[in-house]
Image (cartoon, coloured by chain):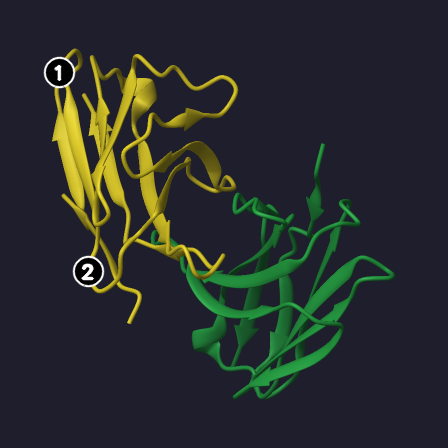
Amino acid sequence: GAVVSQHPSWVICKSGTSVKIECRSLDFQATTMFWYRQFPKQSLMLMATSNEGSKATYEQGVEKDKFLINHASLTLSTLTVTSAHPEDSSFYICSARTSSTDTQYFGPGTRLTVL
Amino acid sequence: QKEVEQNSGPLSVPEGAIASLNCTYSDRGSQSFFWYRQYSGKSPELIMSIYSNGDKEDGRFTAQLNKASQYVSLLIRDSQPSDSATYLCAVNEGGGSYIPTFGRGTSLIVHP
């Protein structure tokens, strides 16, 4: 139980293009999903928290117009990196929790490389 | 600002030994505590959670929580080379807040 998937697992794109990453909870309803970014040998950095049907809450320093988050259903959240640049290259990881527990379950991550 | 502190390591132990990983936190009101394992290039995976003072055992893993001293630890018995990874401590404030604060992680190396 508590499986979270992400798609794609890796993506390479050209600078200036937009990339959408999907996060799905496969066997539970996720009332809250979290998006993290992790640079090599660095710690997890929380980017935003999204609740189903509500606007995402972004952490300080994260541009909401650049990192668009949509949590349209209890099993799907998407992160769109708009006008990506090489400095956006990173490992993006989502996690999800149900309303009945405060445990987060992580997806496998998406490695983004912007050329 | 809530802080979760972990020694970055690396902690090196021989195969078969007990690995002890420690974590301290600043928010005395914290109620939920988690240990995650993260292999290089992979996302974190949950090892165990603990909510009450004392020990909680799951296989070779034992989590220990001491709220008065504001620390939580993870013991790994009979360490194996496959346990080599970064171990992340996460702390939830509780009371309706489900946004955890993560430590920077401790790198564990188990050598044969």
Residue type indicated by callout 1: Thr
Residue A110 place in picture, x, y as percent: 24, 42
Secondary structure of the residue carrying numbered label 2 = loop
User: Dot 1: within a 10 Å radius of its alpha carbon, few (fewer than 14), some, or many (20 or more) residues?
Assistant: few
Q: Which chain carries label 1?
A: A
Snapshot quadrant of residue B39? bottom left
Q: What element carries label 1?
A: loop
Which of A55/B92 is in front? A55
Q: How crowded is mark 2: few (under 14 residues within 10 Å), some or many (20 or more)?
A: some
**Quadrant in the picture for residue B109:** bottom right
Which residue in the protein does label 1 denote?
A: A17
Q: Give the residue at x 43% y 61%.
A: A100
Where, quadrant-wise, is the N terminus of chain A in this rendering? bottom left
Q: Where is residue B97 in the image (x, y as percent from the top left)?
A: 57, 44
> What residue would you read off at disc 2?
A26
Image colour assigned to chain A: yellow
* Chain assignment, label 2: A
Compared to residue B88, the image places residue A45 above or below, namely: above
Of residues B30 and A13, the one drawn nearer to the viewer in this rendering = B30
